[in-house]
Image (cartoon, rainbow, N blue to C red):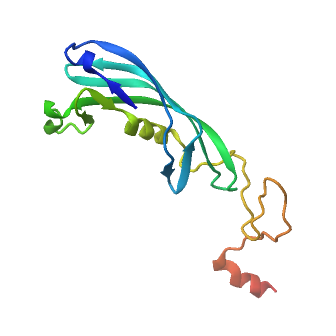
């Protein structure tokens, strides 16, 4: 996902809009694999602010993964804002201690790492197929969303298990 900014370099205050669509590789987040079902779409604008190039836009994607509770595959639509500031490596802005700036070489800005980062920031910490997912039975592994199992699911705190024995 690259943006050619050659026509903006010598024109402070200028801007242009862009629309990029690209298929991305599988990404891992918290042990879960995220597969991009369709190309990731990015629309936005690049503005030259005295050799600081502000990229603002919107990222849209559909990802496929397995539910953290029931392990069934599902798809999730994600929409995330994108706002990053880039500077050429030789401009000296990062030497002043500004960690918010991203450096680039030549006339092309590669926004792909920040696009992925923006998408990941919008995802919940635990990816589940639905808020009311019942998950798997801890004893037999049955998907409790599909059918009920016959396991005894009495949960006893191990610290209090001795009291259960005394009661008998």
Query: Vertically, is 18 above or below 82?
Result: above
Q: Position of residue 51 (x, y in %)?
A: 20, 22
Q: In this view, does 38 lie to the left or right of 116?
A: right
Query: Vertically, is 101 above or below 161?
Result: above
Quarter of the image holding residue 54? top left
Q: Position of residue 41 (x, y in %)?
A: 50, 28
Quarter of the image holding residue 168? bottom right
Query: Vertically, is 164 above or below 145?
Result: below
Q: In this view, does 44 lie to the left or right of 103?
A: right
Q: Residue at x 40, y 36 (%)?
A: 112
Q: Residue at x 71, y 74 (%)?
A: 156
Front residue of this view, candidates 103 and 167: 103
Front residue of this view, candidates 41 and 141: 41
Q: Is the N terminus in the top left, top right, bottom left or bottom right quadrant?
A: top left
Q: Is residue 67 left or right of residue 31?
A: right
Front residue of this view, candidates 84 and 116: 116
Q: Position of residue 59 (x, y in %)?
A: 48, 29
Q: Residue at x 62, y 39 (%)?
A: 76
């Amino acid at each position: 996902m690259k943006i050619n900014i050659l026509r903006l370099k010598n024109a402070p205050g200028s801007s242009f809009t862009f629309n990029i669509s690209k298929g991305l590789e599988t990404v891992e987040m918290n042990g879960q694999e995220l597969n991009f079902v369709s190309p990731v779409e990015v629309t936005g604008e690049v503005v030259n602010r005295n050799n600081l190039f502000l990229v603002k836009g919107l990222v849209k994607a559909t990802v496929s993964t397995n539910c953290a509770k029931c392990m069934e595959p599902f798809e999730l639509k994600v929409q995330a804002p994108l706002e990053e500031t880039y500077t050429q490596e030789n401009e000296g802005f990062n030497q002043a201690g500004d960690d918010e700036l991203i450096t680039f070489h030549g006339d092309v800005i590669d926004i792909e790492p920040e696009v992925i980062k923006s998408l990941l920031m919008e995802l919940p910490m635990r990816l589940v197929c639905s808020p009311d997912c019942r998950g798997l039975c801890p004893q037999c592994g049955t998907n409790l969303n599909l059918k009920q199992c016959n396991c005894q699911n009495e949960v006893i705190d191990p610290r209090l298990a001795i009291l259960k024995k005394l009661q008998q």
